[in-house]
Amino acid sequence: MRDWQELGEEHQQGSVEPSVGRAHGEVAISSVSKDSPPSWDPRRSPCAQGNKSQDSGIAEMEELPVPHNIKISNITCDSFKISWDMDSKSKDRITHYFIDLNKKENKNSNKFKHKDVPTKLVAKAVPLPMTVRGHWFLSPRTEYTVAVQTASKQVDGDYVVSEWSEIIEFCTADYSKVHLTQLLEKAEVIAGRMLKLSVFYRNQHKEYFDYVREHHGNAMQPSVKDNSGSHGSPISGKLEGIFFSCNTEFNTGKPPQDSPYGRYRYEIAAEKLFNPNTNLYFGDFYCMYTAYHYVILVIAPVGSPGDEFCKQRLPQLNIKDNKFLTCDEEDGVMVYHHAQDVILEVIYTDPVDLSLGTVAEITGHQLMSLSTANAKKDPSCKTCNISVGR
């Protein structure tokens, strides 16, 4: 019985073989497909049988060493290195490693969503540590469990295996600057022409502005960004800032009268927030199962804590020359432009005093359906996704 897909042999329909480099300890790893799986028995999983292999098709032999002291290192959004210790006895008989990789159960997950199929990986035995890489089974910022068996392939194609190792937990990383640059380049393609703007604006309920005046000395305070956008975005749940909009209506050159965030709008002159004393960063590019695409930008005063946070994690943009939001001087006056074909979400990382602008009620509607609060990105959109998980 051949229960595991193996590198270098015929592939079953729907099986996947990662394309990876051949650095020391880095191998191509075959995975069992959920479209056309081999006769994988979930009872054989370490999670199901107390680390014991329980199937007549795979023999168990005490002589094969059991991996222990498992170490996970060099974690990225779609890869990690794994190593372990083994007794030297029968070590030379090992031909393969079996890796049982599962998403850690999330009690708050959507109960209507199809359950994630565990990923069973087969790798030829190589010097450790070994790199496991694959964006189709590894997602950014996600908790996983992993366990390992050693195996010896027999002449009939069956395997002799060790007992399962202990189960280890780890969490994948956020997108790196390299990944965000790939998103940035995709966003540039659809940004469109530039339109003039003169103000940034922020819509909220009347109670919000009353609270700011009473409890924060008239200054809007930064708060932690929600989890909207790309799952791997390094700013979600970490960066503190104040959300502003800047898109204008094509025919008027002014902010739209409708808003999904509240009937009261704070407007502030663009130069108060965005000027040569600030840095501009690209934060994310996403959509929500609609034709509209969103670009998140971060404006941070030079040298501020927000600036230091972004400098380490986000691609920096030239404030005078980029495809999304620009600030330049013409005839002694600061002139501002924004991209027409994407909706810009601007995060300003410092407090903003209400006295620097004005608060007034909008004449349009509050369109709650357009809110992006904690909105999840469409993982199937080819326009705004990159091949490193979602």
Image (cartoon, grey):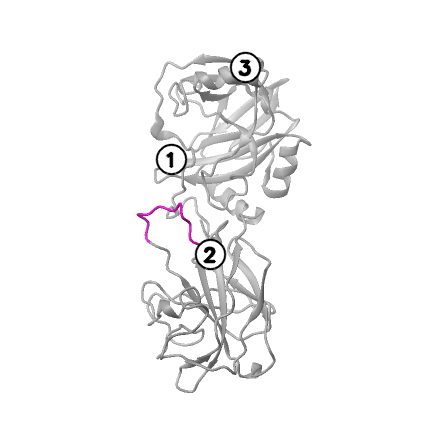
Quick check: marks 2 and 3 in contact, CB under 8 Å?
Answer: no
Q: Nearer the viewer, residue 216 or 175?
A: 216
Q: Nearer the viewer, residue 57 or 288?
A: 57
Residue 107 coordinates in the image, percent (x, y): 40, 48
What type is the residue that disc 3 sits on? Arg
- Secondary structure beneath dot 3 equals helix
What type is the residue that disc 1 sits on? Tyr
Looking at the image, residue 113 sits to the left or right of residue 61; the answer is left
Quick check: marks 2 and 1 in contact, CB under 8 Å?
Answer: no
Whether residue 106 is in magenta: the answer is yes
Whether residue 190 is in magenta: the answer is no
Mark 3 or 1 closer to N-term? 3
Which label sits on residue 213?
3
- Identify the residue at the far right of this view: 303
Residue 290 coordinates in the image, percent (x, y): 34, 38
The residue labelled by disc 1 is 292
Which label sits on residue 317?
none
Residue 240 coordinates in the image, percent (x, y): 57, 33
**What is the magenta range?**
104-114
Badge nearest the viewer, 3 or 1: 3
- In percent of the image, x 48 and y 31: which residue is there? 345
What type is the residue that disc 2 sits on? Leu
The residue labelled by disc 2 is 138
Mark 2 or 3 closer to N-term? 2
Vertical relation: 53 (above or below) 106 = below
- Gap between marks 2 and 3, in whole Å? 46 Å
Where on the picture, by quarter, is residue 301? top right
Q: Nearer the viewer, residue 161 or 203?
A: 161
